[in-house]
Image (cartoon, grey):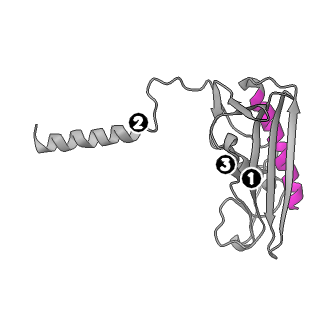
Amino acid sequence: MSARMTRTFAASLVLLAALSGCVSIGAKPPGTLLSLTPEAEPAAGASSSGTLADATVVLEPAAAAPVSVLRIPVQINAANVAYIKGTQWVERPSRAFQHLIAETLRARGKGLVVEADRNTSGTRVGGRLLAMGFDVPTHSAVVRFDAMKWLPDGKIETRRFESTVSGVDPEPDEIGPALNRAANKVAGEIADWVG
């Protein structure tokens, strides 16, 4: 084998090894991918302006372990968690929730809203996503968020938000819309709280 063919073969092996961590050949893809869709969005052509220094910043929240993965958690009881088969999130739930909060703030006309914390001195909103899944004992979709608001004067405020949608079965075609409704309710309450 020539030196050139050896290098090409070695490069192919390196590329294949790198891809093996991203692609599971032969694995069955999930039947459904879930995302959060804002119930309130800015109208086409709507605009806002301001300086980056004074913008409202929506940070990606930290996430509790059960919701830090792409699967949808099922809280069986106080100590046991499982995951719904056949579906997963399109992106990290914390990232999807960040986008939802930002879009809700924009739809409410809260001025310039950004999702990156660069040279800003305006209000910042973040927190910790505690739950975004299904609760077996109550047959409910649950979204729970511990919010934190940093004000320009240095004051910090915290508040817990929670929304549940009852009468839901842990099936992708039911849990997705129910989680979307619950997440939108929480995002709307956060937008009111941000003021």
**Quarter of the rendering containing residue 168:** top right
Residue 157 image position (x, y, % from top left): 85, 64
Q: Name the residue under label 2.
A: 20
Magenta span: chief secondary structure: helix
For the N terminus, the quadrant is: top left
Query: At x 73% / y 73%, what residue is drawn?
Result: 121
Q: Which of 57 and 10 is in front in this view?
A: 10
Task: Tell me: 19 left or right of 118.
Answer: left
Residues drawn in magenta: 175-195
Q: Name the residue under label 1.
A: 128
Q: Which of 3 and 100 is in front in this view?
A: 3
For the C terminus, the quadrant is: bottom right
Query: At x 69% / y 37%, what residue is drawn?
Result: 35
Q: Mark 3 points at which residue?
A: 95
Q: Earlier in the sequence, mark 1 or mark 3?
A: 3
SS assignment at label 2: helix
